[in-house]
Image: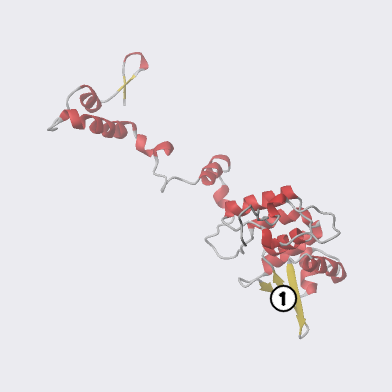
Amino acid sequence: MFVGCGGIPTPPARFLEVVWGTPRGLQNPAVQTTSTTLTCFNEVFNVANTPDFQNPATKEPKDLRYRRLHFPNADNLVFNTARKGFVPMPILLRKLVRHLSAPEFRVLIYLHLRCSRYGICYPTQDEMAFELGLKGTKNLGPYLRSLEAKRLISTKLTMGKKFYLVHDPRVGIEYLLKHGRLKPEEVEEINQLCIDLGQPPFGLDSGEPDKGSGAAVPDMLRKPQRIISVGDTD
């Protein structure tokens, strides 16, 4: 691009010819001038390659743009999921963090990291205590029993080996919901996350609080009452 008088950019001659003159070789200039002008404009100013004009199918993801902008060296720092060596972690699990103590959460995450694709693992308690930084296995037992009571894991001892089955966090949420340990606003937030994730929200089949617990049943979880009007025969 050339710079004219006063520093104002002067478009190349081809651009001027298209905008202010009749494009050469056109049979019907009145019809084709607009599209030709836009094509030349894109070629001259490279508009089509700017982020706002990119095809959505090929546009760089937003989070990747943020990463390149704020963390230029991120490629050397983050884990590359194209390689092996990682396990899936349910996003919904974050809604249970507030209902777990710090040691319980550490043990649960450890079991998630040890599980195979079938949701089962069988590390020894000595190994678990060592890798978790505990002084002994006696400090591990209460946390395992607590996680099992909250329906987040199942255990089975057979032939001298203990097996651990790590549950979908939905099982733990359903247990808390059934026993009235989730506030209505928590249920609303959990269901919104479920919708965002494309998962079914928690509803009527999740149970109700225990009798005598004093916990109110959220309106969104109450079973709908049929209104019988005059004239109904059934």
- Colour treatment of the image: secondary structure
In this rendered view, identify the residue nearer to me: 102 or 13: 102
Q: Amino acid at mark 1?
A: Tyr
- Residue 169, visible in the rendered structure: no
**What residue is drawn where x is 75% and y is 61%?**
178
The percent coordinates of residue 110 (x first, y second) are 72, 64
In this rendered view, identify the residue nearer to me: 139 or 204: 204
Give the residue at the far top of this rendering.
6
Give the residue at the far bottom of this rendering.
159
The percent coordinates of residue 200 (x first, y second) are 60, 58
**What residue is drawn where x is 56% and y is 44%?**
67
Residue 214 falls in image quadrant: bottom right
Residue 165 falls in image quadrant: bottom right
Of the 4 image quadrants, the one containing the N terminus is top left
- Residue 56, visible in the rendered structure: yes
| Circle 1 SS class | loop
Of the 4 image quadrants, the one containing the C terminus is bottom right
Q: Is residue 150 above or below residue 46?
A: below
Q: Is residue 81 left or right of residue 46?
A: right
Q: Is residue 128 above or below residue 34?
A: below
Q: Is residue 201 above or below residue 53?
A: below
Residue 32 falls in image quadrant: top left
In this rendered view, identify the residue nearer to me: 213 or 57: 213
Q: Is residue 136 above or below residue 41?
A: below
- Residue annotated with mark 1: 122
In this rendered view, identify the residue nearer to me: 80 or 87: 87
Q: Is residue 104 left or right of residue 39?
A: right
**What residue is drawn where x is 56% and y is 65%?**
84
Q: Is residue 138 left or right of residue 164?
A: right
